[in-house]
Image: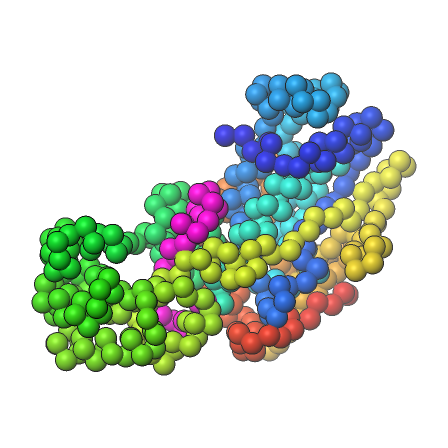
């Protein structure tokens, strides 16, 4: 499926005008970065890169796309001819997917002609802004859970395609499973799910519903015990499944009080190994508030797929350098109030102390950083139009998840506090 029209019209009108002025073939460098983190956040997590590589590969203008552009007079004949042969032949480098990031540092660097790089702007930002927002929120929830498992279950609170992207981003950030089957199929994410309240309401009694579920899934299943009365539901769950019942799920009520009561009841019934999972409109703050409660796992929906109040990461895509009419490289930058940028090709490194803790994001402008300057943050994703397949599909998703865990361990302890604060480490220019 082509991704070519998942873009804004002005990307193509800029192409059209640049062809007319003869500047479309100028070599350029574009960078993706965040001017700031969402208010109060101390770090972000980069996500979406593996999905983006697939989307760039599918950015093709076939007859259907070209006919629509022609019929709607979006661009002229010269631009249509150019688009018919479009294949990105430049290079893209960027932060490892799963990397922590801070304001000002280039998360993605796109190098190519103006024409082939500028028309990717909307696609790049639409993928990275959403996935990064979800991963950044999910990472905070993982930290708040302090090692207890989390499952992503927000598909019903997102666009059907965004639901798949959100499940992937949350998994990269440390969630253990998703309820979304397409995410499981496409990216190798473990899937989970048993029954909703409608299954209980379907049957003549709660006990009949529990017996039907246990017959289908075995006693290790998770039974939803709050359709009617939680205390009675727990009693029936253990009666039906036995003391080997896998788990009970609570989706309502005053959770700290309710969870403590359910734990005590399960233990009194002999179901000491039965786990408790909660799924009631959780976010990082409610998860943190449950740290002292005997919760074994969490299911998170709306908050994770909406970035916990910040559904876009605020990333921008800016031209920072190009060759001029004489073939010389020129650094360019915006001077707009509150939106000024820093010109020139950049090379970010993570500076660490002797214990391996991050202390600064150092950006070298123009020349590559000297050896030993810190941990280099950019890796090549596309070289002269050829995609590095290691970062795609289930394998790329697993690699990103592994790197996210590594990057989070590198942060200073203060970065994990949920209270409002400044970025955990400063961004400095060398």
Q: Position of residue 128 (x, y in %)?
A: 58, 50
The answer to whether residue 215 is magenta is no
Numbered label tally: 0
Closest to the observer: 355 or 419? 419
Q: Is residue 350 left or right of residue 369?
A: left
Quadrant position of the C terminus in the picture: bottom right
Residue at the (15%, 73%) spot, across then down: 271
Q: Is residue 422 above or below residue 203?
A: below
Q: Is residue 335 visible?
A: yes
Q: Position of residue 260 (x, y in %)?
A: 28, 79
Look at the image and give the residue range highlighted in magenta.
141-164
The answer to whether residue 159 is magenta is yes
Residue at the (77%, 38%) spot, across then down: 27
Q: Is residue 78 above or below residue 275?
A: above
Q: How is the image coloured?
A: rainbow
**Quadrant of the rendered image containing residue 153:** bottom left
The residue furthest right is 326
Residue at the (65%, 33%) spot, across then down: 89
Q: Position of residue 136 (x, y in %)?
A: 53, 61
Q: Is residue 340 left or right of residue 275?
A: right
Q: Position of residue 375 (x, y in %)?
A: 62, 64
**Quadrant of the rendered image containing residue 249:** bottom left
Residue at the (21%, 80%) spot, across then down: 264
Q: Is residue 342 visible?
A: no
Q: Is residue 257 left or right of residue 216?
A: right
Q: Is residue 429 left or right of residue 53?
A: right
**Quadrant of the rendered image containing residue 102:** bottom right
């Amino acid at each position: 499926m082509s991704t070519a029209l998942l873009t804004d019209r002005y990307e193509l009108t800029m192409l059209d005008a640049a062809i007319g002025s003869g500047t479309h073939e100028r070599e350029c460098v574009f960078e993706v970065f965040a001017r700031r983190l969402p208010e109060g956040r101390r770090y972000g997590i980069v996500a979406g890169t593996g999905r983006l590589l697939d989307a760039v590969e599918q950015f093709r203008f076939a007859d259907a796309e070209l006919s629509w552009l022609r019929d709607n007079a979006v661009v002229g004949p010269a631009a249509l001819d150019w688009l018919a042969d479009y294949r990105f032949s430049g290079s893209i480098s960027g932060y490892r997917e799963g990397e922590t990031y801070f304001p000002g540092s280039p998360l993605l660097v796109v190098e190519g002609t103006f024409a082939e790089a500028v028309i990717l702007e909307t696609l790049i930002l639409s993928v990275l802004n959403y996935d990064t927002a979800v991963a950044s929120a999910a990472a905070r929830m993982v930290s708040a859970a302090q090692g207890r498992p989390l499952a992503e279950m927000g598909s019903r609170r997102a666009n059907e395609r965004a639901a798949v992207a959100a499940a992937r981003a949350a998994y990269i950030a440390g969630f253990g499973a998703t309820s979304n089957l397409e995410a499981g199929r496409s990216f190798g994410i473990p899937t989970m799910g048993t029954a909703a309240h409608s299954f209980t309401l379907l049957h003549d009694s709660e006990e009949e519903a529990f017996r039907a579920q246990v017959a289908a899934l075995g006693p290790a299943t998770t039974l939803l015990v709050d359709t009617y009365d939680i205390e009675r539901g727990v009693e029936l769950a253990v009666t039906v499944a036995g003391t080997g019942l896998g788990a009970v799920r609570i989706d309502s009520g005053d959770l700290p009080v309710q969870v403590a009561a359910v734990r005590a009841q399960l233990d009194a019934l002999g179901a000491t190994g039965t786990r408790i999972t909660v799924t009631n409109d959780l976010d990082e703050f409610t998860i943190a508030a449950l740290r002292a409660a005997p919760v074994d796992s969490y299911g998170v929906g709306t908050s994770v797929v909406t970035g916990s109040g910040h559904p876009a990461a605020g990333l921008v895509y800016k031209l920072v350098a190009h060759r001029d009419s004489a073939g010389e490289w020129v650094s360019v930058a915006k001077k707009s109030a509150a939106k000024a940028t820093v010109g020139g090709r950049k090379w970010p490194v993570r500076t660490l102390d002797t214990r391996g803790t991050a202390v600064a994001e150092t950006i070298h402008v123009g020349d590559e950083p000297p050896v030993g300057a810190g941990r280099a943050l950019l890796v090549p994703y596309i070289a002269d139009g050829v995609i590095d397949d290691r970062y795609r599909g289930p394998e790329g998703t697993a690699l990103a998840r592994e790197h996210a865990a590594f990057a989070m361990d590198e942060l200073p302890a203060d970065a994990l506090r949920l209270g409002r604060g400044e970025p955990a480490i400063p961004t400095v220019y060398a």
